[in-house]
Amino acid sequence: MERQRKLHAVLEKNKTSSGRYLFRPAIINRAPLLLVVIYGWLLFTFNPANLIDADAKFFSKVQQSPLQFSIDRYFAWSSRFWIEGATVVSSKHTGLFLIVSSLMTILLLFSVSGLLRYSSPGKNVILASLSIAIFPILSFNSAGWIATTVNYLWPTALFAFWVYCSEREHNRKVHPTFTILAFLCLLLSLFSEVTVLALLSYMCIQFCRQKSRLVKPYFIVTNVFLVIGVLNVLLCPGNAIRTASETRRWFPQYADFSAINRLTIQLSHMCNDLFTTYPPLLLVLVLALICSAIVAANHVALCLLICSLMLRGIAAPILSERFSSVAQQLAQSNLSKSSIASLYSPTVLATLSLLLILVAILNIYGWSEHTLLLDGALAASFVIGLFASKSPTLVASLDRPYIVLYFVMVIICSFIISDAYRLMIADVKSHTVDVAPPASAAPRNNTII
């Protein structure tokens, strides 16, 4: 009761004469993000999924303890130490899996909201709406719901929480307890190869953003963790065994093709997913940028984005047809270099379409920190997706390597839409001619976000 009275006193203190609050607790402002979790529960309630499917069938039959299984897998299959054990537990206790996955989703969304400084419910509604509307949730079923979620969503959520704490630490707004918790989350997340690449990309962006930050104790510790993560991936004995085994199973011709050939396959795979399999992601991003360019009256950016859409329209049907043929040949182990060569022209067009989006962002925001973060995050997530070309499962993995890219695109769409709305409201206010209110009158709040 005492705590409630104190909270009520703070709210009343921040109340204007018009009855509006100048301050609301962050947890209330971010409450709309819980709609994403509610949507997930409703989705599985009305569309029941077989959780013990695909990889989960194998994990559900493991007789060893999760710890012993993780140790054995580390030396015989994968560097994802605790993730392997967590998948075993999740496969045997699906209720626990659903609860932890819900908490990880909340952690991810709340961390992103805090990172973007979404201090109003409206902005969080935008983030929640886009997460529900355009994020391809079916990508979490590519290796079965349990295996894919534990391997990709959980480490990503832990990493996002560390990034959020890292940015707040720069502003000296993190309690030491949260710093310790953040580094624990970072350590756990680095057992995923994808998150190691994400941390490496983040540190590169920080180097371009503000070099002086990297010599602070916080980032020195981060670099130590990064080295540990890289060494874990490179030196894990299980990874070499896994690569040899998967080469025999999925891509016996792997050694016959150059790095350029494999990169072409992976790039065409990624572009085909963005253009054909999950088109809303890229279309919403381009439309959000078009709105931002219109608000800013940036005609050059508009031309770049229209050209991007034209190239996408030309490349998409050709790429879809030719990539399907390559994927079929790959599955039958009769892939030829001439088939890969057929991917060159549509892949080049698709790549140009994506590059024009990056250039449009640069043109809209100029040489600013916004451009560095938006283009840097997009480019880094593209590279993370393309890094899967070093694996013999580059097509068999389906779209799992692109899950981080999907997250990043949703986040960037949310930021661009919120920023365009803010600029539009500011422009409307600047052109509004009205009688100035008396000095004693309360200020009007014309913004939703």
Image: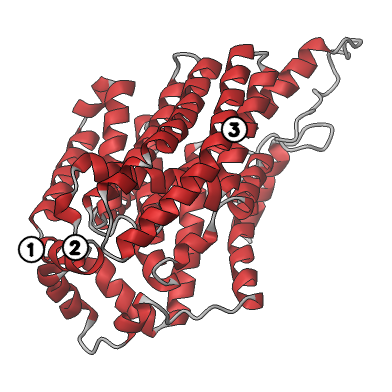
Closer-to-camera residue (159/11): 159
Closer-to-camera residue (441/183): 183
Q: Which mark is first along the chain, 1 or 2?
A: 1
Residue at mark 1 to residue at mark 3: CA–CA distance: 43 Å
Secondary structure under badge 1?
Answer: helix
Residue 229 placement, left or right of 303: left
Instruction: Look at label 1 and name its amino acid.
Output: Pro
Image coordinates of residue 47 in percent, x first then y, are 63, 75
Q: Residues within 10 Å of mark 2 (few under 14, many from 20)?
A: some
Q: Residues within 10 Å of mark 1 (few under 14, many from 20)?
A: some
Provide the residue designation for mark 3: 286
Which-is-in-front pick, marks 3 and 2?
A: 2
Can residue 344 be seen from the camera position used here?
A: yes
- Which residue is at 38% across, 61% downward? 328
Residue at mark 3 to residue at mark 2: CA–CA distance: 39 Å
- Which residue is at 66% across, 16% downward? 296
Image coordinates of residue 440 in percent, x first then y, are 85, 17
Image coordinates of residue 58 in percent, x first then y, are 30, 82
Provide the residue designation for mark 2: 252
Which-is-in-front pick, marks 2 and 1?
A: 2
Q: Quadrant of residue 251?
A: bottom left
Q: Quadrant of residue 415?
A: top right
- Which residue is at 63% across, 32% downward? 288
Provide the residue designation for mark 1: 237
Residue at mark 2 to residue at mark 1: CA–CA distance: 21 Å
Q: Which mark is first along the chain, 2 or 3?
A: 2
Q: Residues within 10 Å of mark 3 (few under 14, many from 20)?
A: many
